[in-house]
Amino acid sequence: MARDTEVLVLGGGSTGCGIARDLAMRGLEVTLVERGNLTDGTTGRMHGLLHSGGRYAVSDQASATECIEENEVLREIAGHCVEETGGLFVQRPEDSDDYFREKLEGCRECGIPARVLSGSEAREVEPYLADDVKRAIEVPDGAVDPFRLCVANAIDAENHGARVETHAEVIDLLRDGDDIYGVEVRHDSGPGKRTHATPGTTEEITAEYVVNATGAWAGQIGAMADLEIAVRPSKGVMTIMNVRQVDTVINRCHPKGDADIIVPHETTAILGTTDEEVSDPDDYPEERWEVDQMIDTLSELVPILEEARTIRSFWGVRPLYEPPGTGTQDPTDITRDFFLLDHADRDGVAGMSSIVGGKFTTYRMMAEDIADHVCEKLGVSTTCATADEPLPGSENIATLEAGMDDFGLRSPVARRSRQRLGSRAREVLETDEPNPVICQCEGVTLAEINDAIAQSGTDLNAVRIRTRASMGNCQGGFCCQNMANELHPEYDEETVREALDELFQERWKGERHALWGEQLSQAMLNYALHATTMNRDRDPASATSDVDFAAFDGGSH
Amino acid sequence: MAMEDDVLVIGGGLAGTTAALAAADQGAQVRLVSHKQSTLRHASGLIDVLGYTPAGDGPLVDPFDALANLPEGHPYERVGLETVREALSFFDEIAGDTYEGGHTDANALVPTHGGTVKPTARYPASTAAGLASDDRDTLLVGFETLPDFEAPLAAAHLEAAGAPFAARGVTIRFPGIVRDDAKVTRYAHLLDHDETVETAAGKTTARDALADIVRSQLEEEARVGFPAILGDEHTNTVRDDLAERLGVDVFEVPMGPPSLPGLRLEDLLYEALEDAGVRVTTGVPVVEYETTDDGRIDHVVVDRNGTEIPHRAAEYVLATGGLVGKGVRSERERVFEPIFDCHVPHPADRYDWFVDDVFGDQPYARFGLPVDRELRPLDVGDEPVFSNLRAAGAVLGGYDFAAEKSGSGVSLATGYVAGQRAGTEAGR
């Protein structure tokens, strides 16, 4: 029977997009479906740490070794998504000397470059570290933009012929006896680029092979074909500061614990995190104490955090998994390793494998393993090229940097745009049209917004993750509507209005967790701008009853 | 050396300047101190009184009907309906012909840059020809370098709102703007001074060049709306000139920050303060206060470039703004008024300060001081904190100005009452 595609990948996170890219580069016909936007699951809800492996150097040396290898690969293939910040494992007076020594030895055993700094040397690197910080181990941790990295994988998969469908939720696995042969999806607004206010449709997509890369949601997918996949989703909070209190990744050097990392990320610093098992990855409490704990505990490392401004908090859900019978109680003790579950071997149901566990830094290596497995199943003998071929935006980046101009932009804006776009900068920014700044906080210009709209239709959250527009201090209060404006005239007014409402509400979701001090003032200002002047809260165009215009003041002339 | 005045107003926004003018009107010697730039530059320049009831009904044709039925504690309920009318008349005198809307009790619906309409009691004369109840067809003109106003989208939005006219939008290049990120004041300056600009046809003036481009786009429309950048100092002349060249009425569409109509209103008010003899000191925070034995404020201390200067007055008006103006502040565990530590009612848990719908009934939007009918801040036991302190404007609690579209009206009405009472008391 003819199938719609050779391989169908479920899930548009880093793993799914990595697999789609890998297989497409090997010449296979690939379709990827994702329930929401790319990165909407766990990938877009992580702290942005590019592991050196240091965090696992004592507890899990196999993972640590993989991390340092992949860390080096990603610097090469995704340079435009990585910031080489370096990292410190910081020891406070009450932290164990033995553990500090084990950490240092572990790093060396795993091939992670590591150097000890005295307390004062560490404070020279990071002046806001607490005065009583005893010493630190310097490692090559980095910061990575998970949004742009994931999107770059999807774009490259498409460049190699893949079909990538976002806002296409799997509503059923197609199973014939002991064979899974595809899925049924519900398109939020029809297939192709998302367009608000367009009615949904359903579609059956058949495939030679299905890869379930839905992470924390893998169990829900499995259940559609009566397969039990016991993922153990574990939530963690991340709190975003409005500036970078540190330019280096700061880790607490202790065996394990909550609130022990600060990652500088673009214009912000991200505090993390917690580790608490949840039953439903879509529905779990987001609580005040978690945010308070980030600030209170991490202030022990960087005291100015106590008084600093946070702009939002968000939670992510780790797709933890351990084989049946392991019985680990504390989620912090569950391995960060990944597992490939071939349902033919495990459950006697052919045509699908699930991938669970794992971590962002090693997404490419995981994807390679799975792609190898799929190729073996399909009798394909091509080999993986993803470790050597740069992602779109990172081709020849060093030589391109040299020849870069500012494209008529003020230099801070040009610099930030170039960093985001990498080798795509010229293609995107070189324009004869006026190119005003749309998002002042993050320095995003009209040309960059339009480039993102061309990729993702009316979905302004998809524009946001590609550009960082609306992700700065004002959380979109000043720029949301200007982003939406650019959807017109390609999309009609009602569609634009719906797209704007969705983005504004999404920004509010995270801001709710930062509502005190400066950010509460900012929230009130944003509310006033949108409700008072623009009357967006009581917009007559969205109201159910008509306005009797003739009854109002028609002027005195 | 202490400053001595009859009335000291703290805060330089709409409420503070109105209070100072009202106090001066009573013959008092008035001083106004302010710390930061006022929030007027964020505001549209529209003087709204009440566009929607607290329950969300509206847009209200007649705000005064609804004013009689507001809940206890709402600032309008505190001062009473007639006072709101008096305050508006007081404003009308100050504003003269720069504002319109005083000919009727009915609200006007003014098109704004978001593309919808906003109910307001008074509006700058520059917006008058654009009212949405006027059924003349409309051309909206936007500029390629000004992404805050997408004219074709705004026109479509007006039609979706049911406006009784055909609206069409065009986007043009603004003659003389060479930088893509030019500030709105640059546009205004070009037009104010009718600067020489370079066009394809050669050298001409900014107003001529703009009119030429718009004329080529104009069809049967009887009026043309521009984003609110039509001059700053000479806005009437700029508008009249363009109207004459185009042969149709010209109006402005209020914009977000920085807002020229807001800045023009600020200029208007500060000129009035100067005319009224009010002494104004800006850039100085109030950092401390002292009370007398009988519980009155004796003096406040102002920080002037690091020097602490006592300011003594018989009566004080607190008009420091709300959360945006920082007259109300917050920390993780509390919401407070930073100068006198007046009582600000709020739920103990900050997760009860908001609701999940961004445009829902937001508790934080109502944060502010409870006051008696004299506008004196009340303590937890509902007693006035100081007999000679009154509060006005957004520092007051119990209302959501953004949802009700009542911010300017409350500032005017409470500023007027606080200033008038302070002026009267000080004269005794």
Image (spheres, coloured by chain):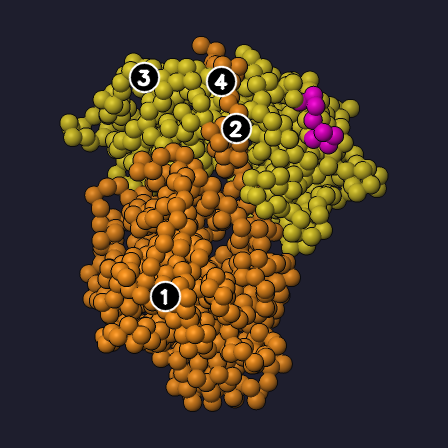
Chain colours: A orange, B yellow
- Helix, strand or loop for disc 3: loop
* Residue that badge 2 annotates: A544
Chain for mark 4?
A
Three-letter amino acid code at disc 2? Thr
Whether label 2 touches label 3, CB < 8 Å: no
Q: Which residues are magenta?
A: B67-74
Distance of label 4 from label 2 (alpha carbons)? 15 Å
* Direction from residue A431 to residue A41 in the image, left or right: right
- Crowding at label 3, few (<14), some or many (≥20) Cα neighbours within 10 Å? some
**Which numbered tag is attached to residue B221?**
3
**Which numbered tag is attached to residue A549?**
4
Badge 3 and badge 4 both on one subunit: no
Distance of label 1 from label 3 (alpha carbons)? 59 Å
**Magenta stretch: includes residue A347:** no
* Direction from residue A111 to residue A29 in the image, left or right: left
Whether label 3 touches label 4, CB < 8 Å: no
